[in-house]
Amino acid sequence: MPKIKAASLLENREFRRQQLISAALELAIAGGAEAITVAAVASKAGLARSSIYEYFASSADLVADLVLEELDYYTKRLADAVGSATDPYEKIELWIAESLRYVADGRHMLVKSLNTIDTPDFRKEEISLGHRKMLAPLRQSLIETGINDSQSAAAFLSGVTDAASIRIDAGNDAELEIQSAVIFALAGLRALAQN
């Protein structure tokens, strides 16, 4: 049995859980979501295969935790980017720019890879809640602009950011794509707000 490396059993349990998640993350970055197997994660973490089942019901359950951790990271990153802004258009500008910088640094490929794994049904609602939490500041800013149909505006913004993401992934200059997406999106939002 491994020695306890934390001050309490609860802290040690969280330490081991994070150790397994870190191992799975390294495997996913190196080989995609399909590289995350119970045996591979246990080996990478230096633990017995059976010990994984003390923390996760399956590799799909572990992937769900990875998705949730990445959503939390991304949500915090977006919140930090827009944190000091008070004008809704400035918040939207900062949100779009930071979301596209996340694409430019390549981390979004991890989420795309992880989303190919079918997570347990009971975890899907947690992941859906994480997505809604990530989008909440953007939706609130859209409401604050006075646009009548903020859901439609959000769909248009999604189209702009998706197009910019594809262009960034194709190798176009990220900062130029971000600048173009922001200019286009804000001009469109301002026009919608005037209707």
Image: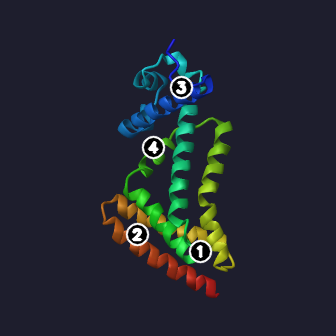
Residue type, label 1 = Thr
The circle on residue 6 is 3
Residue type, label 4 = Ser
From this view, report whether residue 43 is shown above or below residue 159.
above
Element at badge 1? loop
What quarter of the picture does the C terminus occupy? bottom right
Q: Residue at x 33, y 60 (%)?
A: 170
The circle on residue 178 is 2
The nearer-to-camera label among 2 and 4 is 2
Q: CA distance from mark 3 to mark 4?
A: 32 Å
Choose the circle earlier in sequence order: 3 or 2. 3
Q: Determine which residue is flagged by label 1.
A: 86
The nearer-to-camera label among 1 and 3 is 3
Q: CA distance from mark 3 to mark 2?
A: 44 Å
Q: Are marks 2 and 4 in contact (CB under 8 Å)?
A: no
Residue type, label 3 = Ala
Q: Are marks 1 and 2 in contact (CB under 8 Å)?
A: no
Q: Position of residue 4 (x, y in %)?
A: 53, 19
Q: Position of residue 164 (x, y in %)?
A: 42, 66
The nearer-to-camera label among 4 and 1 is 1
Quarter of the image where one finds residue 60: top right
Q: Are marks 3 and 4 in contact (CB under 8 Å)?
A: no
Element at badge 2? helix
